[in-house]
Amino acid sequence: MSQSDILVLGSTGKTGRRVVQALRARGASVRPAGRTAPVRFDWNDQNTWEPALAGVRAAYLVDRQDQPGSWDAAAEIAALAKLAADSGVRRLVLLQARTTGLVGGKDLSAGERGVRESGAAWTVLRPNWFFQNFDEGVLLDAVRSGELRLPAGQGREPFVDAGDVAEVAAAALLEDGHDGRVYDLSGARPLTLAEAAEEISRATGRTVRYEPVAHDAYVSELVSYDVPADYALFVADLVGQIRENLNSAPTDTVERVLGRPPRDFTEFVGESAASGVWAG
Ligand SMILES: NC(=O)c1ccc[n+]([C@@H]2O[C@H](COP(=O)([O-])OP(=O)(O)OC[C@H]3O[C@@H](n4cnc5c(N)ncnc54)[C@H](OP(=O)(O)O)[C@@H]3O)[C@@H](O)[C@H]2O)c1
């Protein structure tokens, strides 16, 4: 492996996969890592951390805060960031989330302090909800079923393309000028879930309805499907941030970093519809 590799965690995931592509497109040598990736990295197995970091000059860090279970995310990320800096990694780009306060008891920016204090140069990315939740993530099955039942009320979210997040990450990993920055990353248009569903209906020719549900009813519904109660509350609280318009103001960060506007939701919907991913 090259001494100039860039380590990418979560390389099978929505942003990590695209960060690998964006870095390779710019000629960088990449080390894709994860539990099932060519280089093994498991947050639950610290024995995998040091080998993954050996000889790496920069790293893209993805935590797993959106998954069931509880752990000390701040301590975990701080430990990895410190190990990385001590192993000679000079630059860390950490993916967190654009949320406000605690979500189901979790701070989705808990890792920021760890990278700030690691000794490496750092950039933190805090994106809004990804477009790709609709076609490869948590909302895919609901879109296919034709009904999005969520406690999002009539709130708005400036959904952002995971590809834009990945390009910003690649810029921060490869270029000077991003060190010590916290980037809030949004798309250009704050959309309600009803508007998002209408766009998908128009593009697919199938009716996808948004059905607002109450927070507590949603938690009970998830629990009735055997979702652990603490995780059900986390998901409901995360969606509740949309209902309360807590992070609904668009930012210009994607355009400032990439020199072009963020990808539009309509373009994303058109391409996903054409791919057949939402076919019933
Ligand atoms: N989804 C969104 O809209 C959104 C918006 C803003 C911020 N975020 C943040 O982005 C992060 C990732 O969320 P995502 O939804 O985009 O998920 P994702 O990256 O699509 O999937 C999770 C990734 O993490 C890896 N992973 C899971 N458990 C792991 C473990 N124990 N050790 C090592 N790698 C592990 C998975 O790879 P393997 O299964 O192959 O190991 C996968 O590549 C979270 O911190 C979330 O808060 C997400």
Image (spheres, rainbow, N blue to C red):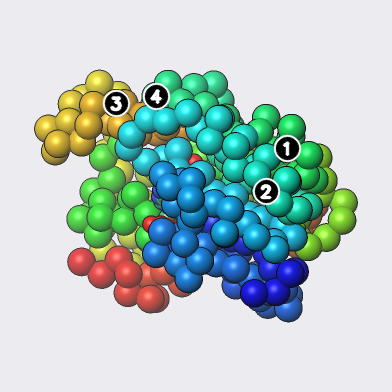
Q: Is residue 136 above or below residue 77?
A: below
Q: Position of residue 87 (x, y in %)?
A: 71, 51
Q: Secondary structure at mark 2?
A: helix
Q: Quadrant of the N terminus?
A: bottom right
Q: Tags 3 and 4 in contact by the CB under 8 Å rule?
A: yes
In 3D space, how far apart are the residues under numbered discs 2 and 4 (Cα atoms)? 29 Å
Q: Residue at label 3?
A: 230
Q: Position of residue 228 (x, y in %)?
A: 22, 32
Q: Position of residue 24 (x, y in %)?
A: 66, 76
Residue 31 falls left or right of residue 254: left
Sequence-wise, which precedes: disc 3 or disc 4? 4
Q: Which mark, residue 104? A: 4
Q: Which mark, residue 118? A: 1
The quadrant in which residue 227 appears is top left
The quadrant in which residue 201 appears is bottom left
Q: Secondary structure at mark 4?
A: loop
Q: Residue at label 2?
A: 84
Q: Position of residue 175 (x, y in %)?
A: 83, 60
Q: Tags 1 and 2 in contact by the CB under 8 Å rule?
A: yes
User: Which label sits in the foreground, 3 or 2?
Assistant: 2
Residue 225 falls left or right of residue 60: left
Residue sitting nearer the eye, 14 or 258: 14
